[in-house]
Amino acid sequence: MTTASSRPSALIIGGSLAGLFTGNLLLRSGWDVEIFERSPHDLDSRGGGIVLQPDVVELFRRTGGDVRHLNLGVESRYRTVFRPDGSIQSKHFAPQTQTSWSLIYSLLRSAFGDEHYHQGVALTDLEQDHAAGTVTARFADGSSRTADLLVGADGGNSTVRTLIWPKAKPDYAGYLAWRGLILEEAMPTVARAILHGDFGFANNRGSHILGYLVPGIDNDMRPGHRFYNWVWYRVAPDALLQEILVDRDGQRRIAAIPEGRPAEKWIAYLRQDADSLLPAPFREVVKATPHPFMQAIRDLASDHMVDGRVIVLGDAAAIPRPHTAASTSKAAANALALADALERAPGIDQALARWEPEQVALGKALLRQGMQTGTYLMFHAS
């Protein structure tokens, strides 16, 4: 598609993982790419653990990384399920690799570079010129940019999706996830002795928790310097969710509260419930975590991902529940398929027409899988 005199151009709205997946792939396919991130702050401290999936490894390979020499995560050995009283329900050998949002982000951010990555720039509107085959993005600072393609990779609360498909909104699933990271060396003795090195799970009434080791501060993967990452799903009526979403400064959040921002009464509530619902190893690690954070579990699978030269991908298009371990890998799969379609099709419009159906189907399949798993774990299992 690229000629010596003309390079296709893309504007990517959203500078998190989905935007960086797409930006790095298009850059290496000969495109001019600009990424616009609405947050004025660095994003590399956000999020927690991620199960490393093949699509993410393939993306690193395609963007020039030698995956044989990239240390992308921490391996767990066994999958262990605990009963509420702390006894072991099942344990089997199932090695897999867990990584962190921070590690993946920092590698992608370094690969893309700073020159064409713009922070603190919020999209307010967009306009398509169908005759010219271009899209113009307008930003809150009064600036605008025009390109051949605009990619909405701006997450579950996507501005791009809202501008194009305003009725496509996430639905609350009826439960939330408390999450936490605790330094490996700070794990209580009982937790470290039983949970350390494995992928652990425990169910109770309206409660499902899991945990595993991930890279530590500055992506340190040396034993003793890693984080233990836990995720605790709790059933919560919408009225309770709305109370929890008011942070410690009285600010109402949309669907998540970052580290250090939940109101203190909800941290106390969390630790009190840990005493009654969790087996001892998980109970102690949750109570010892200094700064838990929270996200509402939501469902979204868009019927459309393409409108002219505007597309959405990643969580802007479909939000799989975390049980699928697929949010990051789906964003990578969307980006890989887009790069392939643009490379093989005779033009951008043909490429997008080929790309969309399979990606919409992927989002809907993950939605069904996540709903089935979540319904069983949160409303039937005990």
Image (cartoon, helix red, strand yellow):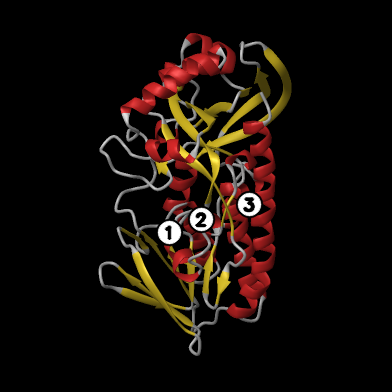
Disc 2: CA contacts within 10 A as few (<14), some (14-19) or many (>=20): many
Q: Which of marks 3 and 2 is nearer the N terminus?
A: 2
Pointer 2: what residue? 18
Q: For mark 1, give the secondary structure.
A: loop
Look at the picture and state if 231 lies above or below 197.
below
Taking the spot 32% from the left edge, 27% from the top edge, the residue there is 264
Q: Where is residue 181 in the image (x, y as percent from the top left)?
A: 44, 28
Pointer 3: what residue? 58
Give me the C-alpha separation between circle 2 and circle 1: 8 Å
Kind of residue at badge 2 = Ala
Pointer 1: what residue? 14
Of residues 309 and 265, the one nearer the viewer is: 265
Give me the C-alpha separation between circle 3 and circle 2: 14 Å
Q: For mark 2, give the secondary structure.
A: helix
Q: For mark 3, give the secondary structure.
A: helix
Taking the spot 50% from the left edge, 22% from the top edge, the residue there is 223
Quadrant (top left, top right, bottom left, bottom right) of the N terminus: bottom right
